[in-house]
Image (cartoon, grey):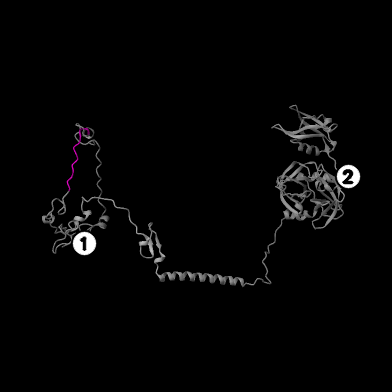
């Protein structure tokens, strides 16, 4: 038996110049074959012809009598396939068949001639049972792929249904398992030993090290003139803590030394008013060096919340008093006092507003004042009252007196009595023990009509300056001289900025019309 590609000795190659014409015996039907290309003893099954078309089908799908050809006879013919140009000479040289070969797929020496015999591949003995060689073999679907269970697989490495490789320890040999366990134990012993040695060395370090010195920087801190620290160093000695004790009850405030030789200290009226005229009450001034002296009340002014106390201690550091006329919103300021009993506390901020009308009513005090305050965001807390609000030059521009708070502490809104007002009241108290204020003689409340604000007159005191000027109830005061009035507090501040006996012009809204009157202010 010979293979299909074998050739007899002396036969010429298929691709050689001596190609021959194959004879008919090579392509003759094998003995016993009944039809073309059928294997021996196999019969082609009969092909069932379809039944003839019915008249209805002929009418629906038959070609019309007037049509001789296909229905697409008028369809344009496709364009002719373009003729490709011959390949370049370089391509021909690169891909040309070597000498002695008829094509690229032939082995050297040419392709041998094919012989078709009954012993060829098609006519192998198992051809009758090979469905791939039988064109009439039926096709059928088989079941799904069957995966071998892990338990049926051999070896320590198995493959699960998702194709993942796993290590199965139970199939490891005893020797390999022993080596793995030994390696784990060895790693644990080494780790434990290293940890023990490290901790043992750390614990053996001496707990005490006599003579140890810590490093420090040699760079000096630069404090420029006008800095907060520079201001605090200059002003803090002139600010004192005021301690008031009445029986078993005590309170703390602050004060500013305004006359060092005379021992006069300015503070708030609500700080010391509870001890005035009370037997056994004690007021004490504590200075920045920690020493203290007994203080006596010189005078109090509930209408401005200013009071002056005196200590018998000459030579005190006196604060420099400035003026709010030189202050603008946004200027830096420093608050110095004893908030919450913490003496010598320094906080800083800016001037938030000027000429802010604020009504003061100290709890447990007879203070009933309206001031044109300096507003600041420097933190001010209970105990700062009576302390100094200082500008960048170190001059006192206000006496801290109140805070605006929802919870009782500083929320960034503090108010100070302008030092110009505090200076005038303090001079009167030191000179006479009391202070005088101008009075208009009306009770008012703040109103607005949506366009303008003013102070509505609720009642007029008989014989007062307002009554003499013809001011009536339900009048709305909107101006005092050239100063606009938008609330009852602004009216009090405008009147208080004058002295008793001054003549002022009041602009009123009466019956929807504007009118003006002249009033000579009384003494409150």
53 is within the stretch colored magenta: yes
Instruction: Assign the N terminus to one quadrant of the image.
Output: bottom left
Q: Is residue 190 visible?
A: yes
In the rendered structure, does residue 310 fall within the stretch colored magenta?
no
Q: Position of residue 267 (x, y in %)?
A: 81, 48
| Residue 58 to residue 192: above or below | above
Q: Identify residue for label 2.
A: 432
Whether residue 481 is visible to the viewer of this picture, yes or no, is no
Above or below, comparing residue 308 to residue 439 in the picture: below
- Residue 412 location in percent, x, y? 70, 47
Name the quadrant containing residue 196: bottom right
Give left or right: position of 56 versus 347.
left
Circle 2 SS class: helix
Q: Which mark is residue 108?
A: 1
Magenta range: 45-56
Q: Helix, strand, or loop for circle 1?
A: loop
Where is residue 304 drawn, in percent x and y? 81, 43
């Amino acid at each position: 038996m010979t293979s299909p590609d074998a050739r007899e000795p002396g036969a010429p190659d298929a691709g050689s110049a001596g190609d021959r014409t194959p004879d008919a015996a090579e392509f003759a039907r094998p003995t016993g074959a009944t039809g073309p290309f059928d294997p021996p003893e196999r019969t082609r099954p009969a092909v069932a012809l379809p039944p003839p078309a019915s008249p209805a089908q002929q009418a629906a799908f038959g070609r019309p009598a007037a049509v001789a050809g296909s229905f697409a006879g008028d369809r344009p013919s496709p364009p002719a396939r373009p003729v490709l140009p011959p390949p370049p000479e370089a391509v021909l040289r690169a891909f040309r068949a070597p000498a002695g070969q008829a094509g690229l797929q032939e082995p050297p020496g040419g392709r041998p001639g094919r012989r078709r015999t009954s012993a060829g591949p098609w006519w192998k003995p198992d051809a009758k049972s090979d469905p791939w060689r039988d064109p009439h073999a039926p096709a059928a679907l088989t079941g799904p792929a069957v995966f071998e269970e892990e338990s049926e697989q051999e070896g320590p490495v198995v493959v699960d249904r998702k194709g993942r490789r796993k290590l199965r320890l139970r199939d490891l040999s005893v020797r390999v398992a022993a080596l793995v366990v030994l390696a784990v134990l060895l790693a644990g012993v080494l780790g434990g030993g290293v940890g023990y040695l490290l901790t043992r060395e750390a614990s053996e370090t001496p707990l005490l090290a006599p003579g140890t010195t810590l490093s420090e920087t040699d760079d000096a801190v630069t404090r420029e003139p006008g800095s907060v620290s520079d201001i605090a160093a200059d002003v803090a000695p002139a600010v004192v803590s005021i301690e008031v004790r009445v029986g078993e009850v005590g309170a703390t405030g602050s004060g500013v030394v305004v006359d060092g030789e005379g021992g006069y200290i300015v503070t708030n009226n609500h700080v010391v008013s509870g001890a005035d005229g009370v037997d056994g009450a004690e007021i004490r001034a504590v200075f920045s060096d920690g020493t203290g002296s007994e203080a006596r009340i010189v005078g109090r002014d509930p209408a401005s919340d200013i009071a002056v106390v005196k200590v018998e201690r000459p030579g005190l550091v006196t604060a420099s008093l400035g003026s709010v006329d030189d202050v603008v919103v946004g200027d830096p300021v420093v608050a110095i006092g004893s908030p919450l009993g913490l003496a010598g506390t320094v906080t800083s901020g800016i001037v938030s507003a000027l000429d802010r009308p604020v009504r003061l009513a100290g709890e447990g005090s007879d203070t009933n004042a309206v001031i044109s305050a300096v507003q600041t965001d420097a933190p001010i807390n209970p105990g700062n009252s009576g302390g100094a609000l200082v500008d960048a030059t170190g001059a006192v521009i206000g006496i801290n007196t109140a805070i605006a708070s929802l919870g009782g502490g500083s929320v960034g809104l503090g108010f100070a009595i302008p030092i110009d007002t505090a200076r005038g009241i303090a001079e009167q108290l030191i000179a006479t023990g009391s202070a005088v204020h101008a009075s208009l003689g009306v009770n008012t409340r703040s109103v607005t009509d949506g366009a303008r604000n003013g102070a509505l007159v609720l009642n007029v005191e008989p014989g007062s300056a307002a009554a003499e000027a013809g001011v009536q109830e339900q009048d709305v005061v909107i101006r005092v001289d050239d100063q606009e009035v938008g609330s009852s507090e602004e009216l009090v501040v405008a009147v208080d900025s004058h002295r008793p006996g001054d003549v002022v012009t009041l602009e009123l809204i009466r019956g929807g019309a504007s009118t003006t009157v002249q009033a000579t202010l009384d003494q409150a």
